[in-house]
Image: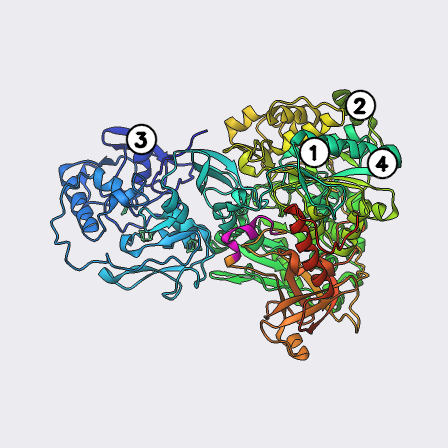
Amino acid sequence: MNQLNETDYGTPARVSEKMVSLEIDGVQVTVPAGTSVMRASVEAGINVPKLCATDSLEPFGSCRLCLVEIEKDGRKMKGYPASCTTPCEPGMKVQTQTPKLAEIRRGVMELYISDHPLDCLTCPTNGNCELQDMAGAVGLREVRYDPAGENHLEMKKDESNPYFTYDPSKCIVCNRCVRACEETQGTFALTINGRGFESRVSAGQMESFMESECVSCGACVQACPTATLTEKTVIMLGQAEHSAVTTCAYCGVGCAFKAEMKGNEVVRMVPYKDGKANQGHSCVKGRFAWGYATHKDRILNPMIRKSISDPWREVSWEEALSYAASEFRRIQAKHGKDSIGGITSSRCTNEETYLVQKLVRAAFGNNNVDTCARVCHSPTGYGLKQTLGESAGTQTFESVMHSDVILIMGANPASGHPVFASQIKRRVRQGAKLIVIDPRTTEMVKSPHVQADYHLKLRPGTNTAIITALAHAILSEGLQDERYIDERCDLQSYRDWKEFVLRDDNSPEAMAAITGVPAETVRGAARLYATGGNAAIYYGLGVTEHAQGSTTVIGIANLAMCTGNVGREGVGVNPLRGQNNVQGSCDMGSFPHELPGYRHISDSTVRSQFEQAWGVTLNPEPGLRIPNMFDAALDGSFKGLYCEGEDIVQSDPNTQHVAAALQAMECIVVQDLFLNETAKYAHVFLPGSSFLEKDGTFTNAERRISRVRKVMPAKAGKSDWEVTVALAEALGYPMPYNHPSEIMDEIAALTPSFHGVSYDKLEKLGSIQWPCNEHAPEGTPIMHVGSFIRGKGKFINTQYFATDEKVTQRYPLILTTGRILSQYNVGAQTRRTENSQWHSEDRLEIHPHDAEDRGIREGDWVGVESRAGQTVLRATVTENVQPGVVYTTFHFPESGANVITTDNSDWATNCPEYKVTAVQVLPVTQPSEWQQHYERFNREQLDLLKGEKAAEPLVTK
Ligand code: SF4
Ligand code: SF4
Ligand code: SF4
Ligand code: FES
């Protein structure tokens, strides 16, 4: 799929029922009303010269290169209108090429070129420069102005951004970058400074890009028609030769990219204009942070060792796989069939995840398979399935452009889902109202041109209380949609729920003491949500990672159902999935109790379909969840683990408990790119492959299945799916697939919501939102239209219970965790890129009052102690957190954020309660005991990686 050159239509497409017909250069053209003359021309195959226009931005009309002659009602229009800013009108006759136009355009180009370095041959964008193209297009042959005249040719470059260069000497002041930063990204970091000849683009207040508000999304670089803003990789490597469309491997937005390549080397990643999730936009991670794929830390040879205090020994694939298989079989022979299991990751493709669960169920012969979605969105699966009937978000991202009210709860899309945050901000700038429910003041509460109408700054751990109080306010003021409820919901459940919700103890007034949010704020937000038009809810891990995570998800669904806000464009209930394939890893049956498509393993009809296809007998009993695996390991009954793409030591709560469990096992097989924290406890290391080295699919938060395309050979010789296939074979269970498309064919055959999915169809449609089957052959953008998947929508009571994790005199503060824009999850990828220039450590955010009470100043080292453990971080004193609450990220292993988090978890799904840990914070002068141990252990393991025996082994197994 070579997509190097895409058509630029000059101005955005317009949607209108009214069509307009006109004539351009003698060609009859019909376009939707509002379409520019420029776009209509390009659609008719007629290119009008342009510089300041591009189809991702609203027209600006500054370069005067796109002038045309127009005749209307038999009369020539005055002057030479700019085709980019002139809308088509019926009966217009447009001339795009006349001698007079050619003369004007040459004059315009001459002025540009007279103040432009004439270094085309050595310019990095030579061959891919619109200025160069336009000089050619208008036939410019000479420049009459004196080159020694006043110009900008000596202006200094800004090289501060690690990924792109700003060379003002090449700027034509077309304003595309400024508009991209405003319209596409919504950061407003750029301005045109100065007037007339003096004017130049400036980041912030004449700062460097790195000092400014710029978040390095790259939209300006993409929009720039010259070499002024250029990717450093392009400067280094030159122009790409070929490209393929693939999907970002970071967050659940699932942005489509053109991987532009030179041979097997990535030159740059360009967000794909036709990507339905991102429509040509991206964030700093997807566009720039792919260098980890070729980082020197990658392990490219399989390795084994008997004990974790032994040096690693590089071996052949055959030896590593047969050693892993023989160890697993030995353990099963000694400790029973159920003594081993597997963990798959939401970073893996659908096909890889499917294979891991198949391997566990069919080759291990048990159901001990789980996924890291356990620790993030398992409550979404439970809560939405119970109420609406399907464990997935209801909308497309695009749907938010039809929302009148946007409610964001427990999520900070500006950091976690940046491209979608840009879309939300765009909608808010168009006038949509915004409600944010979050203990912190995030960028979604207040940023340039965005101000939440309501910020419910609640205490961590009180989500269920606030969601029930919102419902109380709606029902007590009669704002529910009775007609919708009558038609679409289970009425008995509604009556029970209504009675429960209307209890006095659920009122915003009663709940204020618990949540800390004034009743009037809750009532105002409830009124807005219920009566403001189309209202959509977007939520994240701030909802799910709680002891009552599932209850709050249920509460969200209750709220949407009772106001009639499910089942059409602009509304819905939408989990924002953290990692790229959280949705897919859940869909693929990687929970111990469910086969692909969320069907319970105890269902004999479903089980028999898989038994027939796989040629085995399946165990009808659910297997172990991740925390149960750890407990069983410490009890001595769980001894072997196959862990693909997941770093449980860093990402799971209570690190010391996890590490102890791993040390108690006999064979841990880790398949990954790097020697991650979990691999330091492993006995077999199988090299993984990056998203650039394999074929497959990811499913984003919209249920959108998109292709991942192999653009370079697997560096270690095998793609991840091939490794699992080889391991199955070594275990005596052949899985004869030749290509991931065959794995998808099997998934489609066995999973009703995937029946219509195939690689051929993905090729044709670009992407597909499941369910895709006989009833919806091209997929389902919006779910629950007309009726709920479960039939009638079910209301379920959401009784609030305070978490067991109480603040006490000893632990008086609540720690909550989250992520930042430039780093991703455990940081294994982003820490190995220049993204660390923005955030090179995890910090503890603390309110000025709490800091002052403890004598803590900005940047001080502070000890953070909970019932589970202690760590030391540097402090950031900020009012973004409320008094009594502290906050940190978890991207760096040495910070040990999860040394502090506890084993508490969601009552229904065991999703850890990451978001509420009672802690004390005090100034300290040295790293914690755990950190000192970690430093020694880490050093020892890195020595063992080099094949060197540790001088004083810390570990014995
Ligand atoms: S990189 Fe993004 S945020 Fe930075 S100036 Fe360009 S458009 Fe704005
Ligand atoms: S930096 Fe590029 S996009 Fe911005 S004004 Fe200059 S030439 Fe135009
Ligand atoms: S990290 Fe998310 S928002 Fe950023 S480019 Fe990748 S998929 Fe898009
Ligand atoms: S492209 Fe129309 S004025 Fe610049």
> Contact, CB < 8 Å: mark 4 with mark 1?
no
- Residue 396, horizontal then vertical, whole percent: 57, 41
Position of 788 with respect to 718 (left or right) is right
Name the disc covering residue 859, or none. none
- Which label lies toward us, 1 or 3? 1
Q: Residues within 10 Å of mark 2 (few under 14, many from 20)?
A: some
Pointer 2 or 3: first along the chain:
3
Query: Is 605 colored magenta in this rendering?
Result: no
- Residue 895, horizontal then vertical, whole percent: 65, 60
> Contact, CB < 8 Å: mark 4 with mark 2?
no
Pointer 1 or 3: first along the chain:
3
> Contact, CB < 8 Å: mark 4 with mark 3?
no
- Which label lies toward us, 2 or 3? 2
Report if the beta carbon of the residue with label 3 is closer than 8 angstroms to ligand 4. Answer: no
Name the disc covering residue 44, or none. 3
On the image, which quarter does residue 366 sit in?
top right
Pointer 4 or 3: first along the chain:
3
Pointer 2 or 1: first along the chain:
1
Position of 840 with respect to 863 (left or right) is left
Pointer 4 or 1: first along the chain:
1
Report if the beta carbon of the residue with label 1 is closer than 8 angstroms to ligand 3. Answer: no
Query: Is 829 colored magenta in this rendering?
Result: yes
Which residue, given by chain and number where applicable, does mark 2 sit on?
616
Magenta residues, as a range?
Answer: 827-836
Residue type indicated by callout 2:
Val
- Which label lies toward us, 2 or 1? 1
